[in-house]
Image: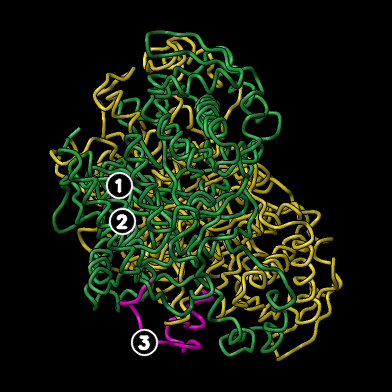
Chain colours: A yellow, B green
Amino acid sequence: MSGIRTLGIKTAKAPGRRSRRGRAGGAGRSAPRQNAHLHVPFITRKIPTYDLLNDEALARIEQAADRILAEIGIELREDAEAMRLYREAGATVTPVSDAAWNIRFEPGMLREILKTAPARFTQHARNPANNVEIGGDAVVFAPAYGSPFVMDLDKGRRYGTIADFENLVKLAQSSPWLHHSGGTICEPTDIAVNKRHLDMVHAHMRYSDRAFLGSITAPDRAADSIEMCRILFGAQFVDENCVIMGNFNTTSPLVLDGVTTAGIRTYAAAGQGSIHLPFLLGGAVSPLTMAGSVAQCLAESMASCALTQLVRPGAPAVLAGFLSSMSLRSGSPTFGTPEPALGSLVMGQLARRLNLPLRCAGNFSTSKRPDGQAMQQSMMSMMSAIQGGANYILHTAGFLDGLLSMSYEKFVMDCDMAGALHAYLNGIEVTEDTLGVEALAQNGPGEHLFGTDHTLRHYQTAYWDSGLNDDQPFETWDEQGGIDHAQRANARWKEILAGYEAPPMDESTGEALNDFIARRKASMPDAWY
Amino acid sequence: MSGIRTLGIKTAKAPGRRSRRGRAGGAGRSAPRQNAHLHVPFITRKIPTYDLLNDEALARIEQAADRILAEIGIELREDAEAMRLYREAGATVTPVSDAAWNIRFEPGMLREILKTAPARFTQHARNPANNVEIGGDAVVFAPAYGSPFVMDLDKGRRYGTIADFENLVKLAQSSPWLHHSGGTICEPTDIAVNKRHLDMVHAHMRYSDRAFLGSITAPDRAADSIEMCRILFGAQFVDENCVIMGNFNTTSPLVLDGVTTAGIRTYAAAGQGSIHLPFLLGGAVSPLTMAGSVAQCLAESMASCALTQLVRPGAPAVLAGFLSSMSLRSGSPTFGTPEPALGSLVMGQLARRLNLPLRCAGNFSTSKRPDGQAMQQSMMSMMSAIQGGANYILHTAGFLDGLLSMSYEKFVMDCDMAGALHAYLNGIEVTEDTLGVEALAQNGPGEHLFGTDHTLRHYQTAYWDSGLNDDQPFETWDEQGGIDHAQRANARWKEILAGYEAPPMDESTGEALNDFIARRKASMPDAWY
């Protein structure tokens, strides 16, 4: 500390000192001016990927995936059309019951089929400035997905409602550090199961002007989601462009259920994107050892992705993996742990060898509070996503309680962290200017650099400036109430919602969407399953 | 989530289910059995380093460091002996005052001098089972260093005392996830400045049986530290082996003060280790741009390291860097931010090119609470240390409040995180067994793997098992009080201290140390500066 204390920089006047602090912060729409250079519709990574394994080890994992597909096979249930597509493509189909088939693939067959899938594609947003690219060196952050519960510090944990859903879409839209509106940002459990997809898609369309995910829980709900996009974007545009994606889980180990495959076929037939996610809880639905989890993940995701190309060659498909571990003492799943983080790095390597975009990892945690555990686990998991080269990072914001709860506080904490990751992915520029030898020479040894030309030239862009973390001296922090990160986040999300304004929407489009939703809702009784 | 929900694994019986939980946790001496395979005196990394920059960029940084050393030079103050050593080695010395000299080095000169420094060396502990290696693929974790304050949830922030110092050494000794006892674990401000080094070194010797750091605040205190080692290890052993290290800060920018260089000379003459640390707060004492901070860091640390080889060729020297950023709005230093994390990765690359061990980064944070901010910042910083290939990671445990405070709670939180990093650095093993195709084949598609031979064979070693994080279902957690990570840590450190037992020490050695300390204390009046 001698450097700091000697120079007394805590009291020194810094260039560009600003009194403005708080309100607009990193989680809000208008972030501090220092971060403006980091605002992008999606990130283009400027740092290399972190390649954990060598080519030989990767080849062994690929061979294991090939063996799984050729020797054990995938069980497809209740989708004869998908069965027919796999069989016509050359797979070996063996019935295991009236409506289930074991499907085996010769080594290399799925890789050949996947050659027609794009390595990179654009998902269009209703505001074209927010279009995102998925694949290659592009990185897209989206909120967490699928929690039945929501929680905040005031009211604790309770089932999510459509009001929560809308709030969370608004929080996402308000953050410059997310790029995509996500999908089932929480389950709106106060709406009938067979109708809630309409309100969810509608919320993304109204309260966000970013790209989003549609429903996948039934083929007709997938079709409704795409039909609403035709109203928003125009039918021809939808046929020619990816404007929506569906996130499809395999039923691990090694099962594809018919609802999922029918949904995948619906999105692919419409030329829309799909994500093919094995949710692998090691020891439960995949081998305990991470090499085995990753091999199975590759096998399942390739088999699922390939279906899209059999329906419509060229349809966007995203390889994916949700790797997690478990407590072998309690049987509880554990998230944000080291082994899945390593596995995610390897999934990145495998996706690049396959030349497909990747969805992997996110801000995972098992904590029930937006506390130290939550952020430690999240950061370990999230770093694996961005270092490993994941392209679409679902679960970037809000994930708590092993994904059972979406936390309002963690949402804004994660958004701020996502901002820091923008700076991280920006890398280090090495030029004559950034090497700054002249800056050191200007005043010479022993003299601070506050007033150098170099400092004045770079001070607005040199460092990520968190809008949520507290960097003040202890005394100032203490005088201002001495509150912690979670309490700041609690105040912040309320401020953001209070200041939220919806992006404008063409009136006739709004009416057409309302009409469609009203007609669809009137066409069926409420169902709660 | 469909996988988890379908299989209902939250209630399924896991193999090896154990009721034991809590007391012994990851931060305690006896960690859960699952982690036993990770217990090591120091880590041997099994994962590659994360190499951020290409060779061309690294060469440019090295050239900038060479320019700084050749064109601007280092200012050496008040150590004519060090000046003489540099001059005799070929440096250009220009007096700038009666007791200060500008020292310039031709490009390549310091690299040539540093060739005699070991790339890897052993620091001996009084318990030989705890010897650590520093350099190469070895990774050593040590507690945070240098805070004047301590804090805990019960009593808040206050000045550190020798009682705190002893408590923190005991906490460190009790964690299987630290390897080294550190040095000024907090400032014992209740002991006179000119005497506290005796009590600090004594506490490390009595309450820990691991390696530690000695005093560097004055040459005679450095000499006392080494003399106490001669009592503990024997004079000949000390002359022939590294048993203590000193952590020396440069006075950035580009100054070496005479107290520091005299201390460095004292350690080197005794064949003991020294760490050469520029503490670079970008914009204050180094260029704002990270490439410039890293170039300066390399220049300063090389110049400081080289002095050891001029005193005693072959003396252990550790290249180091403490890179930090600042809030350009307030002038406050910021820690755990993305740019220094990137810079630390680059320091790793530069150290390997120089073939020297590296100390870099740690669990940095500016938070005043052991909260989400603290652990998010810590994890970002700490990941850079372990991914970048740092060998000696000071500040692994307890760092809060921009290093002004050592937190009891964060100490055990960080120790638990350090355990997770043992698993991370263990990497992914890819073998026929870990690929686990047979595990999947045993029950086939759709069947869980709980009871497979593969699971039973691997369940004790597959996953890091945190002793502090909560992974229980929400309802269980809630019934048990619904406490957060910091509150668990608060209970944990008290449990550990209550159960602490000092490692045995030979009685005559203990008496000899007491005699030495008593004599030294009696030889001078208290001084408080």
Label 1 in the same subunit as label 3: yes
Mark linked to residue B410: 2
> Could you tell me the amino acid type at mark 1?
Leu
Q: Which mark is residue B498?
A: none
Q: Is B346 rendered above or below residue A8? A: below
Which residues lie in the magenta part?
B2-25
Q: Classify mark 3: residues with Cα within 10 Å, few (<14), some (14-19) or many (20+).
A: few
Q: Mark 1 and 2 residues: CB-CB less than 8 Å, in contact? A: yes
Disc 1 designates what residue?
B400
The chain to which mark 2 is attached is B
Query: Is B137 placed left or right of B200 in the picture?
Result: right
Question: Is residue A163 shown to the viewer in this render?
Answer: no
How far is mark 1 from mark 2, CA to CA? Answer: 8 Å
Q: Residues within 10 Å of mark 2 (few under 14, many from 20)?
A: many
Residue A297 percent coordinates (x, y): 65, 68
Residue B222 drawn at (x, y percent) = 36, 40
Residue at the spot x=32%, y=66% of the render? B508
Residue nearer the viewer, A389 or A165: A389
Along the viewing direction, whichever of A42 and A388 lies nearer the viewer: A388
Q: Earlier in the sequence, mark 2 or mark 3?
A: 3
Q: What residue do we see at 28% from left, 51% from top?
A: B200
The location of residue B85, given as percent across then percent down, is 53, 23
> Which numbered disc, 1 or 2, marks the residue that appears first in the sequence?
1
User: Real-space Cα distance between discs 1 and 3?
Assistant: 34 Å
Question: Magenta-highlighted stretch: main secondary structure?
Answer: loop
> Residue beneath label 3, please?
B19
Q: Please, what secondary structure does the residue beneath circle 1 have?
A: strand
